Image: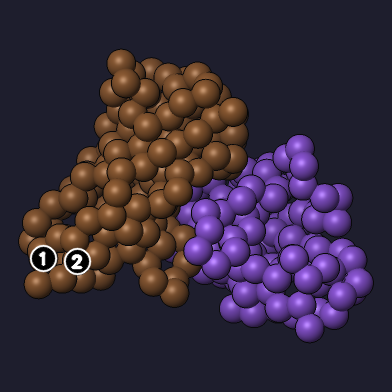
Chain colours: A brown, B purple
Amino acid sequence: QVQLVQSGAEVKKPGSSMKVSCKASGGTFTTYAISWVRQAPGQGLEWMGRIIPMLGIPNYAQKFQGRVTISADKSTSTAYMELSSLRSEDTAVYFCARDRRDGPGDYSFDYWGQGTLVFVSS
Amino acid sequence: QSALTQPPSASGSPGQSVTISCTGTSSDVGTYNFVSWYQQHPGKAPKLMIYEVSKRPSGVPDRFSGSKSGNTASLTVSGLQAEDEADYYCSSYAGSNTVVFGGGTKLTVL
């Protein structure tokens, strides 16, 4: 059974950076894309970007270009999402999610991490 | 990459059917058959209900069905049950290995 386990909640200061991890187990890591999706309090889902670990080339939503870095460590089956220049509006639960199909995928997500709450406040 | 448009709310009585729409553009929903639907209960991670417009993952009841016409995709929940009360989100492939979500619809079972 595939499991995605994320790092714990964080409190950050405005202007700082955050880095959330997502460790996969129970399945193949390298050929399935991992996406990052966030959800601000009381708000909807927002896709941030994705990476196929085998290829190592990330793709980002235009909104986050220049501020987000998504990476993957094949040796530990762990994906990372780093967001810089944090502001209060970045307060959200951040999820990692795995594509249902390997390779290019079908851009649907069948396994999700438990979510990581990041609170940005001075 | 604008968010897909969903109605903020929908409702129905137990046993009835309800349809939730998801309107995009010719750059996403209208061009690609990579439309997905997710169910999210409060405090939980989303759950995949429909992928590739109309396909159901194993374990999802056949009361849930999806379709698409032009730039608009739809999720229909038939035979509404109390446990169907949740938030529902659509998503679509938007080209260049990017994905866009809808704003979400809160489904209430009356």
In which quadrant is the C terminus of chain A drawn? bottom left
Residue A100, label in figure? none
Q: Which residue is mark 2?
A: A120
Amino acid type, callout 2: Val
Residue sitting at the far front = A8
The x, y position of residue A4, in whole percent, is: 45, 36
Task: Give the vertical position of B109 relative to A4 (above or below).
Answer: below
The x, y position of residue B24, in whole percent, is: 58, 62
Q: Answer with left or right where residue B19 lies relative to residue B48.
A: right
Residue at x 19%, y 61% (from the top left corner): A11
Please indicate, yes or no, whether residue B103 appears anywhere in the rendered image. yes
Residue at x 48%, y 54% (from the top left corner): B100
Residue A14, label in figure? 1
Amino acid type, callout 1: Pro
The reply to whether discs 2 and 1 touch (Cβ–Cβ < 8 Å) is yes
Task: Give the vertical position of A11 relative to A103 (above or below).
Answer: below
Given the image, what chain letter belongs to the residue carrying mark 1? A
